[in-house]
Image (spheres, rainbow, N blue to C red):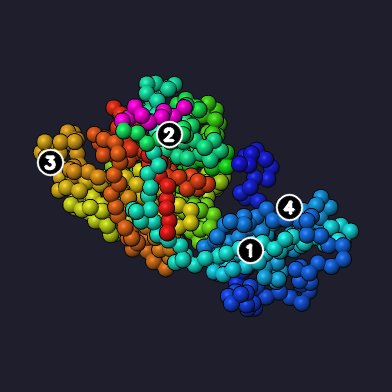
Amino acid sequence: MVNPNHPLPRRGLPRTRVAGLGAVVLLVLGGLVAPVPRTDASAAPTPAEPGRGESRTAVAFTEPDRDTAYVAPAEVALTAAVPGNTVQVDFYVNASRVGSSRDWPFTVTWADVPAGHYTLVAVALSARGIRSTSQALPVVVKDARDLPLVQKSALRWRGAFRLPTGPVGASSFGYNGPIAFNPDHDSLFVVGHDWQQMVAEVAIPELRRAATLDGYPVARVLQPFADPTGGRSAQVNPGDPNPIKVGGLLPWNGTLVVSDYAYYDGGGRQTLSHFVAGQNLARSSETRGPFRVAAPMAGLVSGYMAPVPKAWQAAIGAPAVTGQCCIAIVSRTSFGPSLFGFDPAHVGVKNPIPATPLVYYPESNPTLGNWGDTSPVYNGSTKITGVVFPEGTRSVLFFGRQGMGRFCYGTGAECKDPMYEDKGVHAYPYVYQVWAYDASELVQVKRRDRQPWSVRPYAVWQMEFPAESWASSITGATYDPETGRLFVAQGFVEGGLPLIHVYDLELK
């Protein structure tokens, strides 16, 4: 992971943008007709046949990665590692030049790339006029319809682990909140007890299957609980006497993005939601925020967050997503899952933070159902607490719980709910649930070909865990793109403690 203090971080590198469409010529590659940009008569000689003094060893691609398959319309960063005396790098796609760079780090962006198979070559020119040619790099850009949709049968349980009991600094893991995978440490950030709304970091232990709770390993604490907002959470909704809660966490290039929401914003006054902190929780005084996301309401974006797979970032229009659902005062939030694309690097830099709507259901368009419905998809009992966008798929998965019984507002006794006694929303019995969406339909919303509330999940299924819980609650979900592991926090298993389940996605 790149040091965030480096003057040229990996994200946000200066790039020359080049178009991948426009005037094109057609090349036939092994039977595939692939459109590539037309080049002018001054284009350099075909780099596949270097001349005298050229070398194939002095220049090499650092981006893209050989194993990445992009989704059309793709945007591919082309970056070359070159000798120190290099003054220019030309980039070729299927033997046609698509861009040149004369400044380190010698990067151009190949944009609007349609589906097809391509061959990339970089040619570096030295100050003495000597050209060096890279090895050819194959790149595949896929039609989204060629990627699989995740079904329930693809989730394979690998095992689980517990979190420590008792106080861990200023809070504990009981009655916990959202979780987020941290690729820097192969760890999880976890929001602790509901009363304190603090965050700790734990290492992921070796997984184990067990017949009893005592048989599961316990995660080791890497950082004890601290307030990642540096005591600034009240600024999300100044003057609000009700609690402010952490809605989501997102480790990003050495930082930790935090979203907060007002628990009971009766006046609908909240406009600010996102903070950016360091990953060293003990230095939370350096946190900046809160900042506003450019969405119709903060109640649409102040919750769960997740990275977008690199292959999808151009099509989605953002490297990450943020959303919210089902919080108190339903008129300020979404009647079902909501999701907006955003760039975490913009938090604290652009005001408001640009955001692209992908799906949400306002009160005026409750496509999935009304708050008072008896429904297996959405009603006032719905809770959604995590989202993941798995690599190599076109699925976006939301995790939470759903009341499957008759909707009722009242006390537990009045609503015949043996699980929750308090007055409020009831729809007993409750199930752990996944709402699965087709990312290609979210792209249609991004392109404004359809409205955010016109999208429906392609599948909704229930999850079964091997451990008992008295609350039927998923408190968070997150994903490791390197290993494909999916982490789901089943709440209230061991007293108030969660059990973290780990799944593989077995795609056909």
Q: Which residue is drawn at the image coordinates 49% and 67% (left, top)? A: 143
Foreground tag (2 vs 1): 1
Query: In what element is the residue under mark 1?
Result: strand
Q: How far across and down, in percent of the image, does residue 92 sit?
A: 70, 67
**Among the two numbered marks 4 and 1 on one chain, the one whose residue lies closer to the N terminus:** 4
Residue plotted at (46% across, 66% down)? 146
Question: From which residue to which does the magenta span run?
Answer: 212-220
Question: In the picture provided, is 13 more to the left or to the right than 486?
Answer: right
How far separated are the C-alphas under marks 3 and 4? 66 Å
Residue of label 4 = 81
In the rendered image of this protein, does residue 263 appear above or below residue 481?
Answer: above
Q: Residues within 10 Å of mark 2 (few under 14, many from 20)?
A: many
- Amino acid at the residue labelled 4: Ala
What residue is pinned by disc 1? 138
Comes first in the chain, label 2 or label 1: 1
In which quadrant of the rendered view does residue 450 lie?
Answer: bottom left
Q: Determine whether 224 is above or below 265 in the image.
A: above
Disc with the residue nearer the chain's start (3 vs 2):
2
| Disc on res. 415 | 3
Residue where numbered disc 2 is placed: 190
The CA distance from mark 3 to mark 2 is 33 Å
Badges 4 and 1: C-beta atoms under 8 Å apart?
A: no
